[in-house]
Image (spheres, coloured by chain):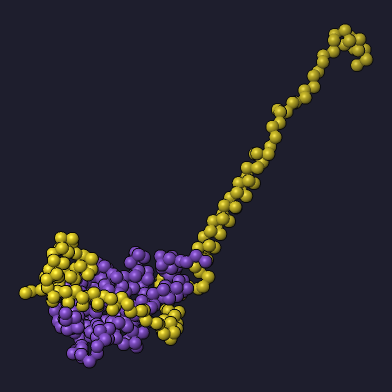
Amino acid sequence: MKLQTDDDLIGSLRLGDIEAFEELYHRYKRKIFTFCLKLTGDQVLAEDATHDAFLKMYQNIGSLNDASLFHSWLYAIARNQVYDLLNLGRSNGKFEEESIWSEETPLDVTEANDTSAILSACIEALKPEYKEVLLLREYEQRSYAEIAAITGDTESSVKSRLFKARRALAEKLRPYFKE
Amino acid sequence: MNHDRYFELINLYDDNELADKASVELFTHLSTCETCREFMKAAMLVRSHITSQALAEVPTSLDHRVLAGVRREPTPMGEKKRWFEPVWFTRISIPLPAAASIIFLVIVGSLLFSPLLLREERPPQQVKVEQVIPIPPELQRQLLPYR
């Protein structure tokens, strides 16, 4: 049985083919759920965001003019659902200079010797607008242009946020790299 | 010393966005600056940590929830389509009448034109003209008493 491409499935989905939706869902569910989970840090919120994202995808598939942009488009929907659930305004380019960290202060914990645990805690403590660019760049290997399209931001703003997130994390980790 | 410039270069290097000339400048600086080396190590560790993480497993309950939710939705085109409609539109409703029309035209055409095609070439009808042979005058005189 020939494996259908995403383009084929999207075409069938536009005609109301539920099986095409199911196939697309199974192909992308883990990536979208992981993205939502890392952004929210909460299983229940991540499930809600994932559910809403795929429903929105189904409802609005007709508005997707270029099937090659499906991946970025789906991530943009998921990202917006997360922001809605977290009651954050969708920054969409109107991003203000603020602290990089969320209200919870990350690790002044030096109890943990495990850098992996430290890293996880630090990344978790980043604000969503910094976390998302880091995840999309490092985890999803998206280009600056794709990240800008997903977040509704400019490329230079994406670069700037990425730089600030890395610098903030490096500052937290530096004591562990003292030569 | 302000390390921000080199932090930015490291950031670009991390994303494969750094030009060769700037790369040389960066690595020359890294050979002498511990702070920037620490920053680079941290940046590489962040990437390594993030990329090493596996995708999360999606709970089965979420699968059911999503698929049930979609089934309740109207189709993306706005109307609730029945299960056979995609096949109906792509394979039956248009091709079938088109094929039927073509067959109909062929049948009608064959009926209309077949007499013309099958008719044999007949030679022009030869009208039998009875030739009246005049009675020679001598015979007429001989037969005269008998009229």
Q: Residue at x 24, y 90 (%)?
A: A112
Question: Up-down: is B25 above or below B133?
Answer: below
Residue A113 quadrant: bottom left
Q: Residue furthest left?
A: B1
Left/right of residue B34 with respect to residue A23 in the rendered view: left
Q: Residue furthest front?
A: A179
The answer to whether residue A161 shows anywhere in this view is no
Q: Residue furthest right?
A: B146
Q: Position of residue B69 (x, y in %)?
A: 42, 82
Residue A95 quadrant: bottom left
Residue B138 quadrant: top right
The quarter of the picture where the C terminus of chain A appears is bottom left
Q: Position of residue A137 (x, y in %)?
A: 26, 72
Q: Position of residue B66 (x, y in %)?
A: 41, 81
* Labels in figure, total: 0
Q: Nearer the viewer, residue B106 or A38?
A: A38
Colour used to depict chain B in the structure image: yellow
The answer to whether residue B132 shows anywhere in this view is yes
Chain letter for purple, please: A
Q: Position of residue B2 (x, y in %)?
A: 7, 74
Q: Residue at x 34, y 87 (%)?
A: A43
Q: Nearer the viewer, residue A172 or B63?
A: A172
Q: Nearer the viewer, residue A15 or A92?
A: A92
Q: Residue at x 20, y 88 (%)?
A: A106
Q: Residue at x 25, y 84 (%)?
A: A115
